[in-house]
Amino acid sequence: MFNLATSCDKCCFCDMDGNTQVGCSIGMLKNFEDAGATITDREDNGTTTKVIDRVCMYRRHTNSKFEDVASEIFPKASFVIIHKLGESEDKLEQSINSIKEMKFISLSKPKIVICHEENFSKMIAFSKNEDFSFANVHIVCMIEKLYTDHMYDEAFKRCSNGYVFFLNSGQEVSEDKLVKLNIAINILMLRVLSVTGDVECHMATMYKYLKGNREKTINQKVEDMNKLFPSKTSYTWEEIDDKVASYLKR
């Protein structure tokens, strides 16, 4: 199996004693080790540094502050809202407002994709509401469904890289979920490709690679993929909550 790896060589957070790396100034080596990553030494031209069998998002060649890097790598998110036939616009507004209330929203203008089961002109007008100018709102009107959950895949095509949250109209998504996802992937160094629960969340590149819900549901495909990885890649929100709570108690 192909694995990505990260070398600490020339990283601004690399702690050196002479020509030998002795640690990481922001503690990421310990976090990777606790997460089960394999860390080895590599010698090049008389200099010995560490190699991690994971992708380290903190690696920087130029001097950087931890706070700035942490802000840069905070998970980018798109939100797909499934608005079914006959549901009120109040429900849709409730879901969108829950996204608007997130403090992190100032970091980037998120994509919100509204998927409706018919060609409904009111949805177009709804997306142009000035109250929703904080986001890039896209409308997907379903004329026909080629297979079960096809509407999720059509909506996904308008999403950006990062993580995609799927929710039904009327459901709310809290900032707490994004904060805990950030801790899980950028501090605890967990391989989080998918999170299931009241609101589903999938890594965009993984969702695209697995072709969404075509032939099998995305959750079934994730279960099959988990069997190929030595470490866990799919979690429930309860599992994420427990791991973050344990970390915060340290």
Image: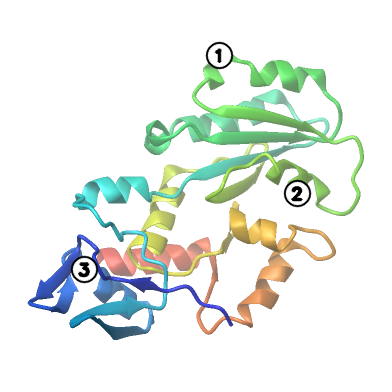
Indicate the position of residue 3 as horizontal and vertical percent values.
51, 77
Determine contact: label 2, label 3, CB under 8 Å.
no
Query: Closest to the observer: 64 or 155?
Result: 64
Quadrant location of the N terminus in the rendered image = bottom right
Q: Residues within 10 Å of mark 2 (few under 14, many from 20)?
A: some
Indicate the position of residue 71 as horizontal and vertical percent values.
32, 45
Determine contact: label 3, label 1, CB under 8 Å.
no
Quadrant location of the C terminus in the rendered image = bottom left
77 to 60, vertically: above or below? above
Cα gap from disc 3 to disc 1, whole angstroms: 44 Å
In the rendered image, which residue does mark 3 sit on? 27
Q: Residue at x 42, y 34 (%)?
A: 105
Q: Name which residue type carries label 3.
A: Gly
Q: Which residue is drawn at 77% across and 18% down?
A: 122
In the rendered image, which residue does mark 1 sit on? 130
In the rendered image, which residue does mark 2 sit on? 153
Where on the picture, by quarter, is residue 159?
Answer: top right
Cα gap from disc 1 to disc 2, whole angstroms: 27 Å
34 to 213, vertically: above or below? below
69 to 191, vertically: above or below? above
Which numbered tag is attached to residue 110? none
Left or right of 149, for residue 35: left
Q: Name which residue type carries label 2.
A: Asp
